[in-house]
Image: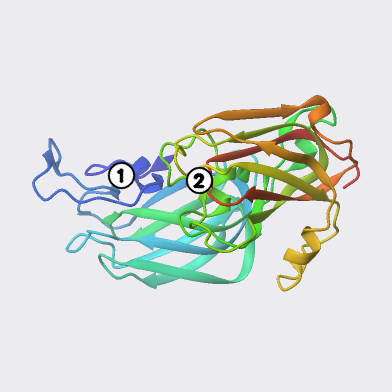
Amino acid sequence: TFATDDFFADKSRMILPEPPLFYPDRFDDHGKWMDGWESRRKREPGHDHAVVKLGQRGTIAAVDIDTSFFTGNFPPEAKIEAADVPGEPGENDWQPLVGKRSLRGDSHNLVHLDAPTSARWLRLHIFPDGGVARLRVYGTVEKDWSEVGADETVDLAALVNGGSAIAWNDAHYGSPANMLAPGTAPVMSDGWETARRRTPGNDWCVIRLGHPGTIERILIDTKHFKGNYPDRCTLRAAKLTQNPQQREIEALSSLWPEIVTSTKLQADTELTIEGRDIERHGAISHVRLDIFPDGGISRLRLFGKKTCGN
């Protein structure tokens, strides 16, 4: 949202979702075009910094200060501060997150935090100047569910609402977490896709909802999957107080009651399931999606209302 200086490369490039690129012969009016945030050479005391507002409040476990392609122009040192306030932080709101440390050029500078920290804002300081290709923040979403009304319908499984994929048997071509990402999948790789099954059985994944609730409408999208979409699917669900142990989750989740019975899927098609096609159920916290026998799904949406008091 702010940078003291981004003369050579705009601060917004630092948080682009795709990996950075390098074009040897690309120049603009300010000089060499770089895919990241880059300030000019500092000729007075001080250093540069940039402020980033996180997409959602979250608990941060690690950060990566990626200096890819910045070789003679990367910052020798950096530090990061965090703030956990709804509005724009004041100077007293900033707390240390990553202490001042040396950076390597053209490298991933990954830092694991000693203790997970909740934050809504980050302030990246670079000393004294230079370029950062990407800033990556790893952790879990901590959505403030008090801001969601009891009668409000939301996607309980969405990544931005704290939904997460916690188990699966196969993710050869793409993680189940991709199904929970915002928007429509731009390409086939931005979905969950398993390898071709050569043995009996089927593929599955388990999703933890961002908040327990009841499901009113389900969207299953096979966009981009044409010769490799699943033939059919089912959806099982349960209300749990915690995630099951990994060694037992497959067996336990296979016994959860079905809220969507065997349903035929089509290629490159958005399927909506609602009304009587969803079995009556109480509050749930986890769902298991089974696909038969294998294939790919680009998006899964579970629209419903949160359960109050949880």
Count of number-bearing discs: 2
Q: Which residue is mark 2?
A: 191
Towards the viewer: 21 or 77: 21
Q: Taking 8 as reference, is 140 left or right?
A: right
Percent x, y of residue 47:
33, 56
Q: Taking 99 as reference, is 143 left or right?
A: right
Query: Relative to 241, does residue 152 appear above or below in the rendering?
Result: above
Element at label 2: loop
Q: Amino acid at mark 1?
A: Asp
Percent x, y of residue 150:
85, 31
Percent x, y of residue 45:
28, 58
Q: Which mark is residue 40?
A: none
Q: Amino acid at mark 2?
A: Gly
Towards the viewer: 108 or 297: 297
Residue at (50, 46) in percent of width and height: 191
- Which quarter of the picture shows residue 96? bottom right
Q: Taking 61 as reference, is 249 left or right?
A: right
Q: Which residue is mark 1?
A: 5
Percent x, y of residue 23:
15, 48
The answer to whether one can see residue 84 in this image is no
CB-based contact (under 8 Å), mark 1 and mark 2 = no
Element at label 1: loop
Q: How is the image coloured?
A: rainbow
Q: Earlier in the sequence, mark 1 or mark 2?
A: 1
- Which quarter of the picture shows residue 129? bottom left
